[in-house]
Image (cartoon, rainbow, N blue to C red):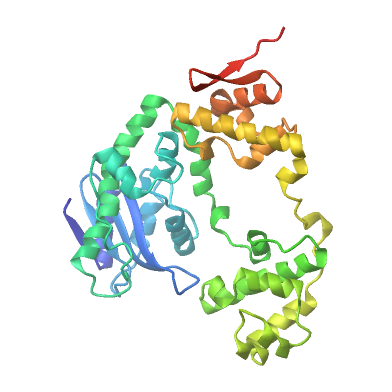
Amino acid sequence: MKEYVLVTTTEDLSALCVRLADQPFIALDTEFMRENSYYPDLCLIQVASVEEAAIIDTKSSKLSLEPLFTLLTNENVLKVVHAGGQDMEIFFGLMGRIPAPLFDTQIAGMALGYGEQVGYQQLIEQTLGVHLNKGARFTDWSRRPLEQRQLDYAVGDVTYLAEAFPKLLDRLRETGRGEWLDEEMARLMDPATYTIDPDQMWRRMKLPNRNAEVLGRLKALGAWREREAQAKNLPRSRLVKDETLADLALHPPRDQTALTRVRGLPSSWGQNDIGARLLGVLENAPPLPKEEIPARDRVNALGRQASLIADLLKLLLKIRCEESSIAPKLVCRADELEALAGGQREGLSILSGWRFEHFGKDALAMVEGRLAFSVRDGKLDLKVIEPS
């Protein structure tokens, strides 16, 4: 393993960041705890270039992260991460912006045949032939002092990444698939991805029905829970589970004491302040406006024949992606397949650019009756039917 240093002072961090600013890219990762809190508790930041590696102890009282923030916003240094969504959420919370420019090797793996959500261990094994020991993965990163095995594990998440990235980049150049990643990378760097709107949290839940009054209460409850969880720094599900909110929206209690009979709520809520706030939310929740009520399940709304066409399109997508060694998720979402099956032709990403060449043109031929399936010599054969 590459030698590394543990950084605990602002002075040492500043010197490190000055050196890293001369590198074309750095590998970046974090270790944090979140099991018992709403906000992630950042414990370590790991960085590495091809020349050096370091672990930054964010719990050190002698450390300011400002030099690192300057490096992370340096447009001349590419930041390389693997499955970096949660890491970017942390930096967005600390900096108010996303590190840029950014490259996610998990997204790159989607274009190179590694699968839709290739893990770091699998990526390193396939790229470098190195087997990683993940034994320290679930340790308590907030405790000090850290054990040597924890530090060795943590730094491995960036030292090997710094070695694997150039190889992945070479493969992307060889295959001409670099531009395929632009949309996904842009989404990773979009601040909207990490901005939580409490008033929209209800959309993440399983809806009990499409009644405007019920959904209005569910929307108000979702927003209330989010703000309470933020204020108390508790995981939202620990405060109140989704199914309990849905039950409250369906069957609102008549008074606060009735909260004691709601499964999933502490009995103390029948007389304390948080219970009073919850009841007030229920009592004052307006019905959900008609234009906000979600459409019915899209596949059911398509009708039987269009649903069958959508299933055939999913099969076609799987076939084409296996042939090209690319993750289906990178090519097309399920809702786009359903839209195409339902007759939509405008505004679909699969009908333009590289997606059209690799899948969209065949998908369009299928829904227009110009593509046929057959079995030949035990293998599935696709054939474009020429117009007569």
Residue in the picture at 72% in, 49% down: 297
State the image coordinates of residue 378 (x, y, percent, origin top left). 49, 22
Residue in the picture at 26% in, 42% down: 163
State the image coordinates of residue 166 (x, y, percent, origin top left). 30, 37
Q: Visible in this render: residue 103?
A: no
Of residues 31 and 320, the one nearer the viewer is 320
State the image coordinates of residue 101 (x, y, percent, origin top left). 43, 45
| Side of 46 where 224 appears, left or right | right
Residue in the picture at 72% in, 7% down: 388
Residue in the picture at 33% in, 43% down: 123
State the image coordinates of residue 47 (x, y, percent, origin top left). 29, 54
Against 190, residue 45 (above or below) is below
> Farthest top residue?
388
Of residues 183 and 298, the one nearer the viewer is 298
Against 188, residue 366 (above or below) is above
| Side of 90 where 218 appears, left or right | right
